Image (cartoon, helix red, strand yellow):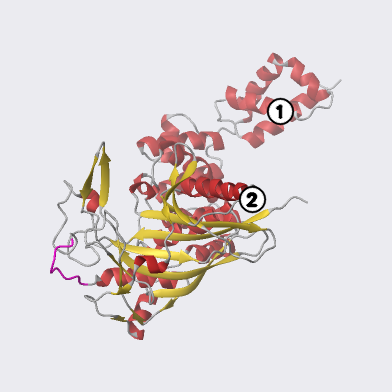
Amino acid sequence: MTQTYEPVIGLEIHAELLTNSKMFCSCSADYGSAPEPNTLICPVCTGLPGALPVVNKKAVELAALVGLALNCSINPHNTFARKNYYYPDLPKGYQISQYELPIASNGYLDIPGDTENPQRVTVRRVHIEEDTAKLTHEKNHALVDFNRAGVPLLEIVSEPDMRNVEAALSYATRIRAILRYLEVNSGDMEKGVLRFEANISVRPSGSSELRTRTEIKNLNSFRALTRASAYEIERQIKVYEAGGEVVQETLGWDEARGVTVSQRGKEDAHDYRYFPEPDLPPLQLEPAWIASIKSLLPELPDAKTRRFMEQYELKRQEAILLTSEKPLADYFEAVVSKSRSSPKTIHSWIAGEFMRYMNDSELALENIDLPAEKFAQLIDMVTDKTVSGNSGKIVLNEMLKNGGVPQEIVKAKNLAQVSDTGFIQEAIEKILSDNPGEVEQYLAGKETIVQWLMGQVARSTKGKADPNVAKELLVKTMEKRRK
C-alpha cells in the first residue's frame, strides 16, 4: 500500500506597524520616503555605544489592538528581550524583541474549512520587535541602509494547525485583511512591509506526530507563499520516500527557479541566547488601558461578512468578496445608501465591470475617482431601463476613465434605451429577412437561436432596444411566419 503524507504548516507573519517614529527612538519610520540612504538615523537605531532605547507607546497600542482582533489575551505584564544572534543588518549586534512574555498570546482565527464549518487556527503569540537595516549587494561588496533599522515590527506566530497550502493562504489573506482593517499596516507586500515565514513538515496521513520542520524565510507575496510551501511539501515527501531524513534548516525561496534553497542550519531558541533587555523596564498594562484599546476595534471582516449576508441578503462568497478590503466594503455600502436598486444588483456591478476595470488598470480603489452617488445613478438608470445593461457598461467605463455625469454621457453618446415598438420592429424585420436560415431553424424547433437573433437586434440598434420588448416582438414576428 502506497504511503500518503499530510503537511503540517505554521506561519510567522512579520508586519511593520504604521507609526510616525521608530520603535525605540524618535527617528521617522517613513523610510520609504527618505531622500537618501542613512538619513533617518540616530545613535539609538544605529547602535552607537551608550545610546538608550525608549519604547514607542503608539506601537504598543497597535500591537495590543492586533492581539485583541485575533482573540488573544493581552498580557498585562510583558517584557523585552535581547536576541543575540549575528545578522549583518542588525547594527547593535542583537535585536530587541519579546520572548517569554509577549504582549499577546493564546488567540485564534477562523478560516474556511473543507466543509461548512470553519477551521480554527491557534495564534500562539503576538509580539513586538524592531526591523533590520536594508542590505544591497553589488558585485563583491554590500551596502547597508539604516533608514529601516528600528522600525516597529509585529510578529504573529500561529500553531502548526494548517494541513494544506490553501489553508495557509486563507489564513495569511485574512491576517492581511485584519491588519488593513485596523489600519496598522498598509499590506503592501511589494514594499516588504508584510512578510511571511512558513514552517513546514510532513507526516504519514493519520499520524499525530510532529516531524522535523524547515522554515522558509521572507516570502513577500501570496504567490511566493503558496509556491514555496507546495514545493517544500513535495520535496520533503520525496526525501522520506527515498528513505532519507529531513534536516532542520532555514530556507530561502528562489522565485526564478521555483525551488527552496538552504541558507543555514535551523536555530532553536537557545541559539539566539535570549536574556532580559537590561535597558528597558517591563511593560505594565493597566486593565483600563487595555479596555480603552479594545473600544477602538472596528467591525472586522468576519463580522462584516455576516452582517452583509443578513442585512443585504448576499450569498457568503458575495459578502466575502465585498468585505475582503475595508475601502471596498465601505464603497459598496455608500452606493447602496444612494441607490434604489437592490444590494444584489449593486454587488453584481461592483464584482463585475467595476473590479474588472480595477484589475486591468492595476489601480487601488483609493485611486479611482468615481463618487458612490454617480455610480448609484448609473445602476438605477439600468434598473429603470433608461439604458440597457450593455450601454450601462459603456457609460461606466467612460466615467471610470474620464469622469462625468451618467445622464450627460448617455445623452452625448445617444445611448438611451428605446422601447418604441415601431423602431424595434423595423430592425427585427430587416434581421429576419437577412437571416432566413436562422428563422427556419427556429421554426424547426431550435428555440436557442433566439439568443443569437437577439444579439443581432442589439447590434443593429446599437444596444438601445429594450431587450424585453425586443424579445417579445422577435418571437411574435417569427411565429407569424409559421405555415
Q: Residue 206: within the magenta?
A: no
Residue furthest to the right: 483
Q: In this picture, is 309 found above or below 472?
A: below
Query: In this orientation, does residue 60 appear?
Result: yes
Label 1 crowd (10 A; few <14 / some 14-19 / many >=20): many
Q: Nearer the viewer, residue 205 or 166?
A: 205
Q: Residue at x 67, y 19 (%)?
A: 431
Q: Looking at the image, can residue 338 be seen? A: no
The prevailing secondary structure element of the residues shown in magenta is loop
Picture coordinates of residue 165 (x, y %)? 57, 52
Circle 1: residue type: Leu
Give the image location of residue 106, x and y in percent: 48, 75
Along the line of sight, the residue nearer the viewer: 220 or 181: 220
Callout in the foreground (2, 1): 2
The residue at 44%/62% (across/down) is 178
Q: Which is nearer the eye, 374 or 325?
A: 325
Q: Where is residue 5 drawn, in percent x and y?
A: 66, 54
Tell me the magenta residue range: 47-54
Instruction: Determine which of the numbered discs, if any, sits on residue 1 in the image.
Output: none
* 50 is within the stretch colored magenta: yes
Q: Are marks 2 and 1 in contact (CB under 8 Å)?
A: no
Q: Left or right? Give the position of 312 relative to 366.
A: right
User: Percent position (x, y) of residue 142?
Assistant: 24, 44
Q: Amino acid at mark 2?
A: Gly
Q: Is residue 37 left or right of residue 180?
A: left
Q: Which residue is mark 2?
A: 243
User: What whole-number distance in Å separates the C-alpha atoms at marks 2 and 1?
Assistant: 72 Å
* Residue denoted by label 1: 474
Residue 80 vertical placement versus 469 (above, below): below
Q: Earlier in the sequence, mark 2 or mark 1?
A: 2
